[in-house]
Image (cartoon, grey):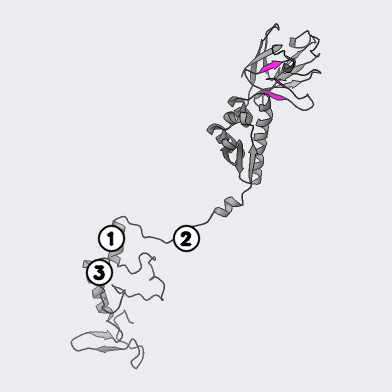
Amino acid sequence: MSFGGSDNEIGEGDRPGKRFKAEGSDFIDADGPSAETQLEALLRENEFGGIGGPSVFPGKPGMSGVPNMSPPGTSPPGTSPSTAGMTGASIARREAEGAEPHVETTPMDFSRLTRDTPTRAIPVPKGLVQYLMTPENRQVLTEESGADVEWAPDEASVKLRGSQEQVKRATRLLQRVLMHCHWGKNESKVRRLLKPRMVESAMIRLSPMSTLRQAEKLLSAAAPTMGIGKDKANDVVIQDAIISRVHCVLELDSERGAVYIVDCSTNGTFLNGHRLPSKTVGKVLCSHGDELLFKDPAMGDREFGYTMNIID
């Protein structure tokens, strides 16, 4: 079909595209109206037409201006599936009204990504749930590990999801909390364990529960320890048969942002009613208000020691 106005034939015979001159009319194509007629119809519809109006060419469905020369099942060039069959005026009117042409999309399925992600559930002592499972601690644990953290207080469990390395980091932080909170727990202690901060100094004040003498010392990088024991070289000297020469040591760890205690005794040191591990095992974090005892509270003496006041 010619759109240029030329009357040249594409071949002889009655094949489609053959043109003839009807009486009182311009040349038209044997298989449809002439290009000039189509153009006039298109201009007329652009001026008066609307979406869903009658076809310009009766008997040829879907022709409302420029005919669709695209292969069956496809949209005309320059159109999207949602604008196929619409006139230029109709599209312009939709754009003027702010209506974006609808683009068909296929929903993406990301379920496999989460299904294949490493997950782990960490059991938590019920007594620790109220101090650990707060919105603030969840955010800190997520930021420090990169893992997705879900509290499950009813199950006393923490559910972790992420890469293998992220889950490993989160697990290590939680295990640190669980271990140190065996010797006393509060929300401030949990937060300090999850996210250590730099501390340059800490004032330690030991308030006696019984006949012991009060003591205090400022711990810093220059003097990071406070020794307690029978030997006179200690900062706090206690003369008692159960006390070792160097019974225990309070130590400021500035990088971990806390004061720790190391048990060096023979008969044991007790923090919040629980015996501390020996110095060969490791040190335990101390918190403001902790009770430090030098005799086993299970034996009935719960006052031979100090209440620790830590200001950093």
Label 1 residue SS = helix
In this orientation, which residue lies closer to the viewer: 155 or 139?
Answer: 155
Residue bounds of the magenta highlight: 272-293
Sequence-first tag of 3 and 2 = 3
The answer to whether any part of residue 158 appears in the image is: yes
Three-letter amino acid code at the position of disc 3: Gly
Q: Quadrant of residue 310?
A: top right
**Dot 3 and dot 1 residues touching (CB under 8 Å):** no
Mark pair 3, 1: CA separation: 15 Å
Label 2 residue SS = loop
Q: Residue at x 22, y 67 (%)?
A: 47
Of labels 3 and 1, the one closer to you: 3
In the rendered view, tell whether residue 276 sits above or below residue 88: above
Judged left or right of residue 152, residue 229 is right
**Badge number at residue 93:** 1
Q: Residue at x 64, y 37 (%)?
A: 123
Mark pair 3, 2: CA separation: 31 Å
Q: Quadrant of residue 215?
A: top right
User: Which corner quadrant holds the C terminus?
Assistant: top right
Mark 2, residue position: 106
Q: Position of residue 275 (x, y in %)?
A: 74, 22
Q: Position of residue 84 (x, y in %)?
A: 36, 68
Mark 3, residue position: 53
In the rendered view, tell whether residue 130 sits above or below residue 75: above
Three-letter amino acid code at the position of disc 2: Thr
Of labels 1 and 2, the one closer to you: 2
